[in-house]
Image (cartoon, rainbow, N blue to C red):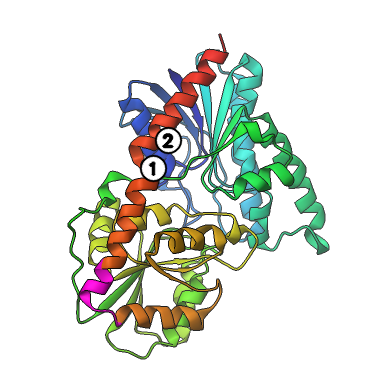
Amino acid sequence: MKILVISQQYWPENWRIVDICEELVKEGNSVTVICGLPNYGTGIILPEYEKGKNRKQVHNGVQIIRCYEHGRGKGPVNLFINYQSFKNSSCRYVRKMNDEFDVVILNGLSPIVQSKAGILYCQKFHKKCLMYCMDLWPISLSVGKITNHGIAKPIYDHYLKVSKRIYSSCDYIFVSSEPFISYFSNVLFVKKDKLEYLPQYSEDVFLASEHQEIEHKTLHNFVFAGNVGKAQDIKTIIKAASLISRADISIHIYGDGSELANSKKMAADLSLTNIVFHGRVSMETMAKIYKNADAMLLTLVDSELSNLVVPGKVQTYMAAGKPIICAAGRASSDIIREANCGICVSPGDPIGLSKAIIKLASLNKDELAEYGERSFLYSKEHFSRSGFFARLSSKLNELTQQNK
């Protein structure tokens, strides 16, 4: 198959869509990605991509076409311009394209308008498109205080219409969280026969050996890995750290994002020495860090979105065979409870989070290992990488055949 992928976010940034595209190439497909200019986290376009440089590249067999986007910068105005700039530039590019692809994949992350170019291509050449949805609009806007009531309601209502139009234009939608299906059906009025649950998987580099032993150290390390944004509620982790007086416990934050600077300042203002910000590191380095962690931290802000979304770190944490402390909504906590692989507390509850950290730090080696083993076995049964790609490839082939 010749596959066109639309994703504002792509390599060299570390997103799941990068691994998906590269695996599809390994399976014998031709994959071209239309994406933006790398600037996530800092909000500043990387120098090697400024002024028209490196707009066409090949990375691990994937053809990359970069369209202009305004850097995310700081504040809601810059973020809005960022969203619109990629939508406009990618649509302009697609209008000039020829009919050369069999099927289109839309990377279902924020902003939803990034998908417009792919839908435009499908309408122009009568092709089918599949979205892999890992984020929900317009409900995701609530993290930025744009809700369906109050002064921001007109903005929310506008994106509700936009979201309905884009999601309904997809021929098929795989969702990464099962509760998404009811939201799509009841709020966005997308037909259920176009929806299917396909959970995320973990990259192979994180896979734990079935016989992995968890080292019980004098200093207990608890790790949060991933995007450091408003939705991830790092504030609750920092507040929890301020409630822990034990010198043998430390919390490590790995990742970058819009709230990293604010999070560092908050920890400094509280004079905390038991929480460390390491920034972004490679996946290979993270795999080693996971192995040496006593447990992993999963936090999301207390919101309706938190009850619907399952962050990709859930699959990664579990594939690494690690216990998980979860302070997030039902979508994530239900998985942790079903797997019996950690402790769940209410989102936005620093007291509960601090007690959970202390409880796991007090477990002996065998008790901690049992949590980790259950985590790994659940991942192996429910979040198989091979199973993910078998279902994805099957559906892409099916949609391609419908074009004929």
Task: Relative to 129, say whether 343 is above or below.
Answer: below
In the rendered image, residue 350, in percent from the top left (x then y), is placed at 50, 80
- Residue 364 counted in the magenta span: yes
Residue beneath the point at 29% across and 88% down: 247
Label 1 SS: helix
* Quarter residue 188 falls in: top right
Residue 323 picture quarter: bottom left
Q: Is residue 124 visible?
A: yes
In this rendering, is residue 62 above or below 175?
A: above
Residue 369 location (% of width, % of height): 25, 67
Q: Which residue is mark 1?
A: 48
Q: Secondary structure at mark 2?
A: loop
* Circles 1 and 2 in contact, beta carbons < 8 Å: yes
Magenta stretch: dominant SS?
A: helix
Magenta region: 362-369
Amino acid type, mark 2: Lys
Residue 105 pos. (x, y %): 52, 30
Q: Nearer the viewer, residue 325 or 65?
A: 325
| Residue at the spot of label 2 | 53
The numbered mark, 1 or 2, whose residue comes first in the sequence reads 1
Q: Looking at the image, can residue 267 be seen?
A: no
In which quadrant of the rendered view does residue 119 lie? top right
